[in-house]
Every structure is written in structure tokens, then in C-alpha cells.
Image (cartoon, rainbow, N blue to C red):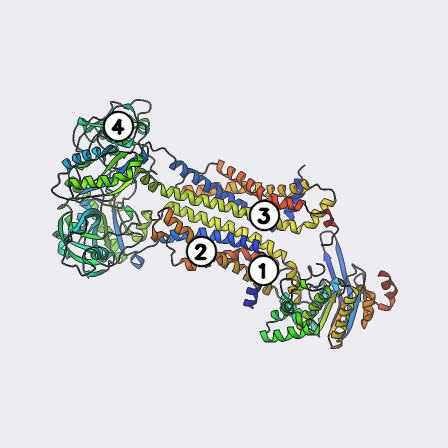
Amino acid sequence: MFFYYCDLAWRSIRKTPMLSMLMVLAISIGIGITITTLNVYKTMSYNPAGDRSEVINSVQLWSQGLDTWDEFIPSITYMDAMNLRNNKELSLKAATYRTGLALQSDNPKIEPVLNSVRLTDRDFFRIFSVPFIYGSYWDASVDLRPAYQVVISQKLNLRFFEGKNSVGKTLFLDRKPYQIVGVIDDWNPQPKYYDPLNGAFNDAEEIFIPFSLTGQEEFDVWGNTSGWKFEPMITYSDRLASEKVWIQFWTELNTDEQKQSFLGWLTRYVEQQRALGRFTDTAKIPSESVQISDIAKWLEDNDVVPKDNKILVGLSLLFLSVCLVNILGLLLTKFLKRAPEVGVRRAIGASRGQIFSQYMVEVGMIGFIGGVVGLLWAWGSLTALHSYFSMDQSVTGLDASMWIITPLIAISTAVLAGVYPAWVVCRTKPSVYLKAQ
Amino acid sequence: MLSMKNISKVFKTDLVETHALRDFNLEVNEGEFVAVTGPSGSGKTTFLNIAGLLEGFTSGEFSLDGVNVSNLSDNKSAKVRNEKIGFIFQGFNLIPDLNLAENVEVPLRYRGMNASERKRRVESALEQVGLGARMKHLPTQLSGGQQQRVAIARALAGEPRFLLADEPTGNLDSLMARQVMELLENINQQGTTIIMVTHDSELARRAQRNIQIVDGQVCDFSMYQPAATGTR
Amino acid sequence: MLHIKPILSSLMRSKSAPVLLLLQIILSVAIVANASFIINERLSLMQRESGYAEDQILTFNLYNFDPAIDNMKQNQVDQQILRSLPNVIDASYSNMLPLSGSGWMDRYVDGPDADTAKSTPGFAFYLGNEHLLNVMGAKLIAGRNFTADEINTSLDDSGMMALVSQPLAKAFWGDESPLGKTMYQGEQAVTIIGVVDKLQGAWVDHENFEYSVIQNIDFGGSSSNKSYMVRALPEHIPALEEAISKALYAENPNRVVENFQTLTTIKNLTYSNHRLMATVLSIMVVLLLLITALGLTGMVMFNIQRRTKQIGTRRALGARKRDIIEYFMVENYLICIVGGVIGGMLSLVLGQQLMSLYSLPMVPVIYPIISVIGLLVVTTLAVIVPAAKAANISPAMATRSV
């Protein structure tokens, strides 16, 4: 019976080509727009941490003075970072920030390039499950006593060492020799959840060096340095001693008990710092001056999904509903026009259910065609977004889930639009249209 | 075969109440060919709609083939229409998008018959009305008489117990009308009960039995015959 | 004469079709009003004059990684090299690039005592030398520029001077001239010596975008990583990129010269989000109107088909062609206006939602009104063709049994 309905539906669609095209156009445009915005939203709101989202936590401290910033800042000061690094309770912990250094190797043929470099502790690689192909992260002792060691990406390894195991070899950063201890496999989480502050869809760094080198080397900070009071940074040690915030701090907390215990530790830490004359915002009690954010909260707080995108998703859903109403009207028009035929079919013995099914199959078919065309629109517009608005490929690539979401939206839109017209037409009285033609 | 007892049908609107049928009684036996006549507005169409289970009625009792069909659900009456009744309309009412075979096939589809059985029945039904060679034609490519024969084939394909014909020759010229009438008589002789509504008294006279409806009631044929001829 | 009453009662009797039309118009008005408001807002953001000679400014990044380089000296030498290149109008160090989305933000206070002093609004804090103003193409409207011997090289030097943008001056000093005023950063005094007509900061969405200060510090010597701005005529810029790299590498090869961008490119990149939003919303509005119009045409055509006999009868009874057209137009306008009013209210509700959720400004009432008018025009176009066709229905239709 289903194939009979399909056959009838296809004939009916072909019989009124303009009307059918109009309906397919309406539904496909509605779907195209919705899928485009949803796709961008979906990829932007993706949580790369997966089931470790609640385990990985960043730390925010209310170190600002009274009447200055009115919210937690994602970064912390160097002083606080150093103190947190010394917390023995935390099993895994890493401070991190970004700099840029000129990269050279023994290979004189490769010109020096200015590369973005991440400073961090060895636990960073464990917290974020960074995959290694050669070697590993540096030894725990390096986090205490700085050593010129480096972890590089496979891409750099290919460029400088032809992809061979380069552990033990040397790279020059700002003309200083760094010994390679590990090479990481392809690793480029999107969004860049461990540091969305400098462009949430930038690529991951390809060079990682020990955080402990900070101070010994005067690395520029590539990222926001924010201060809430006037503190000139004449020398690098001014920076390190300042209340300016520019470092992110990550830790792994597996259970609620661990989280509570760590929050308690942080609270005591704030009390202790107050005694030393820091954390001067007296409007906040110490326990309100500390915050840990898991990845979901962290991505939300840092506006990884731009507001514009959320507005567009909302508007495109409204747009889709206009298309839905439009199709509803057209379907009603079309089906009512076919009432005489329905009368005949009813007289010949079709039940209401059979008529209803016949028309719902037709509606579903329009929805299906609309969905396919809509997917093409979406693909086209995403490609256009990529090429004309330099939107990142990772955001404009069609998300795999869209292959399920699109037909789902298409069919349910069509069904929503079709139920009423099909219901109206299946209730056609068989006797009414038979007498005269 | 068909038995109507005290059937009444009242149409109500905000303003008026119209009695289309009142205390309508009729018995039709198996194998009969009954012609129903009557002036326009007399209730012929209402009778046909009720007899064909296309419409319900207000009160009374109706049984078909020994089964009480007075208060059937919509689904059940659709099933009865599909299996026991064949319809022939004045306007043919073929589905214009379907070719002849597909038109004839429609009731069989709703019966859920398998493809080979459908094919056999469609071919034999079209054969019977003399259109076996034109299965792939569309209704619009045929003359009125041919279209009506297709409609008859459609009614026959379901092998119904009885046929309801509503002015089957009303839209046809006299030659074609005669052909159609002969076809119906033929079918009747093979055992199918036929009820035909018409206002053509000449046609009516060819039936075994004549009934006249006046003001929603069956009138004795002999009593009203002069008046009936007068209406034509 | 418009016979609204019979049209209205006929509309009331036929249930679903007008309701659907109404619904579609309500939603359309709500969307179009809010979308066009956002579009207009973004366009006006993008159309702001920057005050810079955008297409004449080439920027690039320089990174000295040779520890032997004395950045202080090298900075002076490099700027001399840049200025002496052929076709270069002027060149200067700048601690931040205008419109780029990253840079320094700071405040001044009007006294040395932090507790009592009043603070200026936050402003973009440019550090540069006497060439910067000329490189930017910014217009000095009061006071004077720095002179070469007034340029400091460190943040804690004395003799600090500043040029302020006119909007900042207006915001803090009102009609009073800021010239000669002394402001403070901590205990350090800064004298205002000039006012610049227009000097935008780095963050195009910031409310203080027009508030900027240039202070007399050539900070290029304090760090190995810095950016320079070079001014030249647009036609000379492509060739300059190579010339600059070549000259600077010749001076010292142990550095990275990269990231050449004109200010036009930077501006386009920074505004690309807004351009994207405006484009997407415009496309949405156009498609919405198109779909609404086509849907309406389809439905009117159907209605006319269904009412062929009725129309024929009206014609037979003496209705003129224009009466028939008028009938359909009035019917349409009735739905449109009712839908417009409800849709207008809905769009204000929607605007309220957007305002509270995404801190967008509130939609002014004029937008729903314009949207309704626009929709009236579109639906007129959509209805008039089938209505004219309907008017051509022959009065003989009345006698045909349909």
C-alpha cells in the first residue's frame, strides 16, 4: 500500500509542478537556513571534553579591588598561579599562557618563523588527554627546576625532522636550544577549549615549553593582560609581581568531594592572602571569591558561541515556521481541490485512514524532497560563509549529525504542515462531490 | 438482499428542517433489477446515498445482504462499500490522473489484494465492457460512453453483490445509452442485483421493477405511473 | 466604494485560509521588523568614518629574536629605514593597531590622589612618536603634535604629553578645552597638548570606541615583538611589502618580518561578523518576502478558481472589473492590516526578548510599521495579478453549471 501511495503522491506532485515547486522551495529554503545556522551553532557549542567535561576544571579568583570588575575574570595573576601550582592536594594541575618565539632548527634551509608557543606544566598533557606519538611530556622535576625542553606537534616534526622520531633532538626558540622530549599526534580541539580567550576557533599551538621557564626568560604574553588598578609594568618582574591577570589554571577534579575540598582550600587561600593585603574587595566574603568552572561552564562563560549565532538560530526557526504556515496553506488549497477525487475513492471503499495515509505520504514526499534540496542550500551557504566571510572550516563543515537532523526537521515540518490539510480532506463526505462534475 | 424499514433522513440547518426521506420502506431481492424514478428533489439521491452507505440516516433500520448496516462506523461502512457495492455515477467519476487499468484497480487496492489477482480482475473486467485493448489510455482520451463502461468495469472488478447506478446514462447520447443499458442488463443476468436511479421513464421500463419516490416516500408504481410519464 | 462589511463577513465564514494567511503575516512582520532593525544597526556601525587614511596604511609585525640586538637602538634605526624607502610618506611605531580588536585600554584621573580624583572613561591607549599622527592620517583640530625631542621611550619617564580624541574630550571636559590640562596615571602627570578630530580605538563593538589617546612614548624599544605602520599611496603598497622585508632583513637577518596588512584589510576582518550578520539577515528578509508573496499568490489563485461561478454571477449582476479587483485587494488588505497590527506587537515582544537575552537595543516602533508597509506593497503585487485574472472571468460563467 505504501508504494501505491508513493506512486499516487509522485503523480500528484508532478501534476501541479508550479505549486509543488513552490512548496519544495518554501520548505527547502526554511530548512536550508535553519540547518545552516544550526550547523554553525552545533559545531560552535560542541564540547570537545566529552565525558571529561565535569572533571576538567579551571580556577577563577576574585582578586580585583572594590568597585572594579563586576564579574570573575577567566585568568589569574602570576602570584596566584604559582601558589596554586604548589597545592599538594591536587593530583593534576597546570598553569598556562601563550607567547610567541622565533623557531629555528639545525637545518639552515628552513627560514626562521615566529611561532605561537604555549607555556604550561606537564599535567596539561594529561588533563587534556593530549596524544603522543614519540616520547612524552617532560619530567615532574622540570616543573620545579626549569629546563629547556619542548614538546612539538607532528606537523613541525614533519617539517623539521621528516616525521622521524625526533626525541632528543634540538630546536632553537629565540636562538636558545630546547631539547625535544615528545611529539604529539594530530591534536586540534575545536573549539580550542583550553584557551578560547584568543579566538575560540584558532588552531592549537605546535610548541609547548615548561611554564617554569617564566621569569628566567621574559616571554611576551600573547593574549589578554588585564589590570584593575594602575600598575606600570616597566620591567618583567613588575609583571610577575603585579595584580594583573593573564594566566589560566587547570586542574582535574574527579568527584564532588574533591571539588568541595578544593573550594575549601581556595577559600582558606583567599583568607590567607587577605591577611597579606591582597583580595581587597571586602564586599565579597572569601568563599564567594573563588570559583571553579568545568568545561561546559567555561565555554559558556567565555561566549564561545557568539550571541549573533544564537539570534540567527532563533530567527531561522521563526523563518521555518513561516514556511510551515505557507506550506500548510498551499497544501490545504491543493488537497481541497482534490476533494472530488477523494469522494470517489471514499465511495469506492477507501477508509478515512487510507485517504489520510495517502495524503500524508504525499506530504512526507514533499518534505523529503524539500529536505534534500534544503541540505544542498545549507551546504552551499556554508561554503559561501567559508569563502566570503572567512569563517573557519571547522565551523562551516557540515556536521555529521545534520544528516539525521535535516530529514528529521524536514519530515516533521512537512507532517506538521500536512496533518491538518490531510485530516480535512480525509473527512470529505463521499456523497457530496459525486452528483455533479 | 436490501431491506429498508421506516428510514427517515432529516437535514437540519439553523433555519429549516428538511425531510429528505420519511418512513421509507423498500425490499429488494437478490438478482433484481430495480429502477427508481421520481421528480427532482423527491429524495432519489438521498436514497441512493443511504443505500450506498455514503451517508447515514436519522432513524429506521437498514440491512444489506442480511447484515444490519444501520449504525456502522465510518471504517466498517467503507469496507462494506468496498466489498459488496459497486457504484456507477452519472458523471462517471473516473480519476483523471489514472489510466483505465489503474482506475479499475482502485477498489482492489483498498481491499489489499495482491498484484497478480488485481491484474487478473482488471483485465477481465475491462474485457467484459469491451475495453480490454485500451488499458493504458487515460479517461480523457475516451468518449463518454466508453468512460461509463470503464466506470462499470471498476464497479465490476470488485465483484460486488449489488450495483448502485445513479443516472448512468444521463450524460450520454441515446446510442451510447443503449449500449450501457445493455451492459447493465447483461450484468444483472449474471446475478448481480442492480438499483438504478433515473428520470428516464423509457429506461426505467426496461427494468424488472419500477419504484417511484415522491416527497421522500416510496409510492406504488401503478398508482403514479401516469404522473411519472408526465414529468418527462 | 469599498464594501468592507460583506468581505469581512465572508472572511469570517471561511475558516482556515484567512487564519493561515494572518498567521503568516504576523510571523513575517515580527521577523522582518527585528531583522531589518538589526541589519540597520550593523550597517550604521560599519558606515562609521574611522578618520584614518585606511587604504594608505600598511601595517606589519617585526620580531627580533637575536639576543644581541639592542631593541632601543634598533627601533630607531628601523624607523629611519622605513621612512627613507621610496614612496613611503611616513612611518611610525605604534603599540597597537587601530580597529584590530586587540590593543591597550587605559584611563586617566584628574588628580594625583587616587581616592579623590575623577576618572576619565576607558580609552584606547596609543603609544607613539611624532610621526604617528601623520601616518594615521588623523586630523589635529586643536593644540599641537609632539616634537621629536619630546618623545619618551619608557613608561616611567617624565614629561608625558597626550593627544586626545575629540569625543573623549567632549565626554570628560564638555565644552571646556582640554588643552593644557594635567591628568594623572598613578603619580605620573600627563599634559594634554592636542585634540584629534577622530581617532578610533581597536574594539569596534566597545561603547568607548571613539575615545582614544596618543601618548608621547615610542615604546618600540622595550620589546622584541612590535608592530609598525607605514603610510604610502595605495598604488605603492603592494610593492612596498617586499621592499620593507628586504630592507629590514638586510639590516639584520635575525628577525621575523611578517603579517603585512593594510588598515582596510584589518577593518574588513574586524567588521566581518557584522557584515555577515547583515548579509544573512538581508537574505532572510528577501526570501521571507518572496515566499510570503508566492504563497499568497498561490492561495489567491485557488480562491479565485473556487469562486469562479460566484465571480461570474457578480459580473452578470453588473459588477465592473475594478469592483472584482477591489474585492480581492480589500480582502487582502484587511488580513494584512490585522496581521500587521498583531505582528507589530509580537515583534516588539520578540525585540524585548532579544534585548533581555542578548542585550540588543530595543526595536524602535518605526520598524514594525515599515515592515507592515513593506508587506502591504509585497502582497499588493502578489494579489493584483490573480485578481486581474479573476476580473476577466466571463459573466457567462454564471449560467454554466459548475
Quadrant position of residue B91: bottom right
The kind of secondary structure element at disc 3 is helix
Instruction: Identify the mark nearer the N-term, 4 or 3.
Output: 4
**C98 sits to left or right of C217:** right
Which residue is painted at 54% across and 51% down in the image?
A325
Q: Give the residue pinned by disc 4.
A: C163
Q: Amino acid at mark 4?
A: Leu
User: Do callouts 1 and 2 mark residues in contact (Cβ within 8 Å)?
Assistant: no
User: Do callouts 1 and 3 mark residues in contact (Cβ within 8 Å)?
Assistant: no
Tell me residue A293's x, y (percent): 28, 51
Could you say which is closer to the camera, residue A391 or residue C193?
A391
In the rendered image, the vertical position of residue C348 relative to residue A149, given as above or below: above
Could you say which is closer to the camera, residue B100 or residue A116?
B100
Let me know if residue C147 appears in the view: yes
Q: How many marks?
A: 4
Whether labels 4 and 2 share one chain: no
In the rendered image, the vertical position of residue A382 relative to residue C197, given as above or below: below
Q: Subunit of mark 1?
A: A
Q: Give the residue pinned by disc 3.
A: C297
